[in-house]
Every structure is written in structure tokens, then in C-alpha cells.
Amino acid sequence: MWEQVKEYSEKNMLENYELDTLRKKIEAHVEEILLKEGQITIVKDSLNGRPFRILYSP
């Protein structure tokens, strides 16, 4: 029985570590999204009221 307790304890520890790692990855992705949203807002604000012209060569 103690072996099972030890085994479950180890599994629990590994799963908690994996969960913490995934939470950190999610937090990093959220920060990246917020940064990109801020950059988009800056670009939108800088283009405010200006006509948007696409440059191309025929």
C-alpha cells in the first residue's frame, strides 16, 4: 500500500510540475497577445484619419 501512495505522490508531483509549466506558457502567450494588441492600437492611432493607399506596380 505504501508503494502505491509513493507512486501516486510522484505522479501528482510530476503532474503539478507540468501544470505549472503550462500555466507559465499560457501567461507568456497572453503577454505576447497583449503586446501585439498594443502594437496594433499604436498603428491604428497613427493612421487615424489618413487614407490608406496600397502601393503596387501594375
Image (spheres, rainbow, N blue to C red):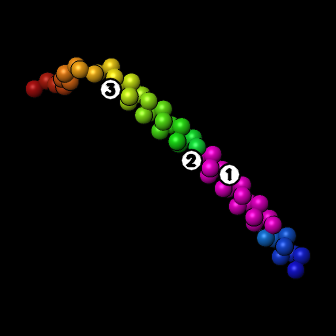
The residues tagged by marks 1 and 3 sit, at their Cα atoms, a distance apart of: 36 Å
Callout 1 secondary element? helix
Question: Which amino acid type corresponds to the residue marked 3 in the rendered image?
Answer: Lys
Q: Name the residue under label 3.
A: 44
The residues tagged by marks 2 and 3 sit, at their Cα atoms, a distance apart of: 27 Å
Image quadrant for the N terminus? Answer: bottom right
Span shown in magenta: 9-25
Callout 2 secondary element? helix
Residue 47 left/right relative to 21: left
What's the mark number on residue 39? Answer: none
Residue 36 left/right relative to 10: left
Q: Which residue is drawn at 66% across and 56% down?
A: 19
Q: Do the residues labelled 2 and 3 touch (CB within 8 Å)?
A: no
Q: Which residue is drawn at 44% across and 33% down?
A: 36
What's the mark number on residue 26? Answer: 2
Disc 1 crowd, CA 10 A, few/some/many (<14, 14-19, 20+)? few
Q: Mark 1 points at which residue?
A: 20
Q: Residue at x 42, y 34 (%)?
A: 37
Residue 55 in sight in this render: no
The residues tagged by marks 2 and 1 sit, at their Cα atoms, a distance apart of: 10 Å
Residue extending farthest left: 58
Question: Which amino acid type corresponds to the residue marked 2 in the rendered image?
Answer: Ile
Q: Nearer the viewer, mark 2 or mark 3?
A: 3
Q: Give x and y (percent) for residue 29.
A: 53, 42
Question: Which amino acid type corresponds to the residue marked 1 in the rendered image?
Answer: Asp
Residue 13 in sight in this render: yes
Q: Which residue is drawn at 33% across and 19% down?
A: 46
